[in-house]
Amino acid sequence: MSQSDDKYLASLKKRYAKATKKQRGKILDEYVQTTGCHRKHAVAVLSGKRQRVKRPIHRPRRALYTNEDARAIESAGYLFDGVNSKRLRAALDVELPRLRAQDAFQVSPTCYDRLETISPATIDRLRAKRGRLPNKSRSHTKPGTLLKNQIPIRTWADWNEDRPGFTEMDLVAHDGGNARGDYIHTLDFTDIKTGWTECVAARNKAQKHVFAAICMARQRLPFPLLGVDSDNGSEFINDELLRYCELEHLTFTRGRSGYKNDSAHAEQKNWSVVRRSVGYRRYDTPAQLKLLNRLYECLHCYVNFFLPVMKLKAKVRRGSKVKKTYHKPQTPYARVLANSHVSIKVKAKLRATYQQLDVVEWRHQIDDLTDQLLATQHS
């Protein structure tokens, strides 16, 4: 403040001290309008209870990111299935140079430079106007009680989750809200260590069809299958699958009844992979079954090679709150390459496959197949 400001404030304080209640209100109005401070602060200053703080003038920072950056983030979000900002940042770290080299990402050089350094928080701000409504799922799990005593409940001591091969599996029903008759189910097969996900569509939840889907998912895994964990549905808790696991020396466990979070890894993929791709419509025809499995073959490459996943590192409970920390987002493909239990031959094969993949091409193929699925609803 200048000397003139000091004199003005001193004059106001004298007038304020001698003024009536009505006059004080007018003096406060004058002071607040002149200085822009809060009325409560003005009362304290004029009554002598507080000194006016001498602060520098803060002007709004010039906007660094433009509408072009917002459009580029929206395009990148589309290519990587709308993943959250931290996962998108990890995907851009790996794929942005390839997208530019393939001429698939048409942005100015300055925009490209900003995309190389943009933070997840800024991505969130640029995407703030985009929202997504939650979807409710339905469960049609019919308990299988015949062999439950022979299949142990999974405990953390039974599994070695520090290596790939231990998986959770679950079924996603495509009944469209009408559970009568036969309808297609999707088997969701998720590796716990790497997040590698395989999906296979089955004609219905009969044991033979689900078992065939499990065998197909196992063939697509880039590493040996070591163990499976399921819910208590009769499509899993049956003699055929139990004998198969014993013959193949696979650890077979199940979750607790009524505890969906026991299969949290698979349940998460039910939404992020299956429901986001095919929605909640009813699929029950051979043509739709064929289209779904073609779609899942595309998702095999798209999800595992291009979409980073976040793995929980630790969680600490403090009273009623739980603080969670996560590892840096990585794709399942990158996690497989970084794991010492996977053979050099398998890693070399995965690298060769990755070099031939194009995220833009796979994104368009997935969109085309989902459009074809939607068209079958109206035919």
Image (cartoon, helix red, strand yellow):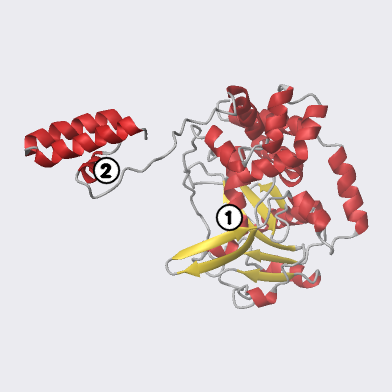
Residue 216 visible in the shown view: no
Q: Residue at x 71, y 67 (%)?
A: 161
**Disc with the residue nearer the chain's start (2 vs 1):** 2
- Say which quadrant the C terminus sits in: top right
The image shows residue 55 at horizontal and vertical percentages of: 41, 40
The image shows residue 133 at horizontal and vertical percentages of: 46, 39
Toward the viewer: 36 or 61?
36
Element marked by disc 1: helix
Q: Quadrant location of the N terminus? A: top left
The residue mark sitting in front, 2 or 1, is 2
Is 292 placed left or right of 164 in the picture? left
Q: Is residue 133 above or below residue 107?
A: below
**Where is mark 1, residue-wise?**
267
Name which residue type carries label 2.
Answer: His
Residue 179 in sight here? yes
The image quadrant of residue 111 is top right
Which residue corresponds to the image point at 71% horizontal and 23% vertical from the top-left? 107
Q: Residue at 56% across / 65% down in the picture?
A: 315
Quote the CA–CA distance across marks 2 and 1. 53 Å
Residue positioned 82% across, 58% down in the render: 223
Left or right: 12 with respect to 239?
left
> Where does label 2 land, which residue?
41
* Amino acid type of the residue that numbered disc 1 sits on in the rendered structure: Glu
Task: Locate residue 127: give its quadrant.
Answer: top right
